[in-house]
Image (cartoon, rainbow, N blue to C red):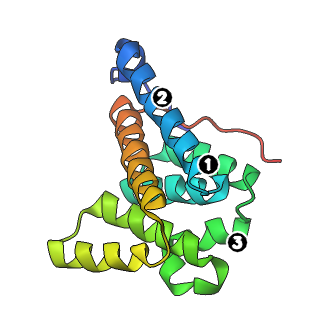
Amino acid sequence: MQSVTHDRIWIDKQTPEAFRAFESVAITVRDAATAAGLDRAVMELVNVRVSQLTGCPFCLDLHTRYARAAGVTQQQLDVLPAWQRSPYLFTDIEQAALQVAETVTSLPDENSMQREYAAARQQLSDDQMSVLIWAATTIGAFNRVSIMSKHPVRVRKEN
């Protein structure tokens, strides 16, 4: 295995005030999710899916563990990239949340966005929709912090 030198600024350490503000937003979004009736498993599915789409290894490592602790099954995590073709593994709310996550992350053309937004709204309240947009936006920002800082994923012993 090759030794990796750290050649990037860890912006979370370089500008900790900004990172603490990010963390505060994440806590606010988590509390709002609970108030809106979105359980931790749904929120972690969003975190994992957005992290898959952005390709953030650090956040994937972290949030797949959080997802399992929140009750997301290993099978759901295994097929998450193909969730649209696996409707029996995900509830209607989880599917709507994943659609919001993908829409926020990819920002498709306006017609596609409107169609996907409308489909998600069939399952989600205004509060849930708002929280999910904030959640996808927030984890996307954390993904970019970790990717640009080149946060390492440490090898750990499997349980």
Q: Amino acid at mark 2?
A: Glu
Residue 19 x/y as whole percent: 41, 23
* Disc with the residue nearer the chain's start (2 vs 3): 2
- Residue 143, located in which quarter of the rendered image? top left
* Residue 115 relative to residue 81: left or right: left
The numbered dot on residue 23 is 2
Whole-angstrom CA distance, mark 1 to mark 3, is: 25 Å
In the rendering, which numbered label is found on residue 34?
1
Mark 2 and mark 3 in contact? Answer it, CB < 8 Å: no
Amino acid found under the numbered disc labelled 3: Gln
Left or right relative to 73: residue 64? left
x and y percent of residue 15 in the render?
34, 14
CA gap, disc 2 and disc 3: 29 Å
Task: Name the residue located 35 percent from the left edge and 40 percent from the top edge.
Answer: 141
Relative image position of residue 35 (x, y in whole percent): 59, 48
Q: Which residue is mark 3?
A: 75
> Which disc, if any, is residue 106?
none
**Image quadrant assignment for residue 53:** bottom left
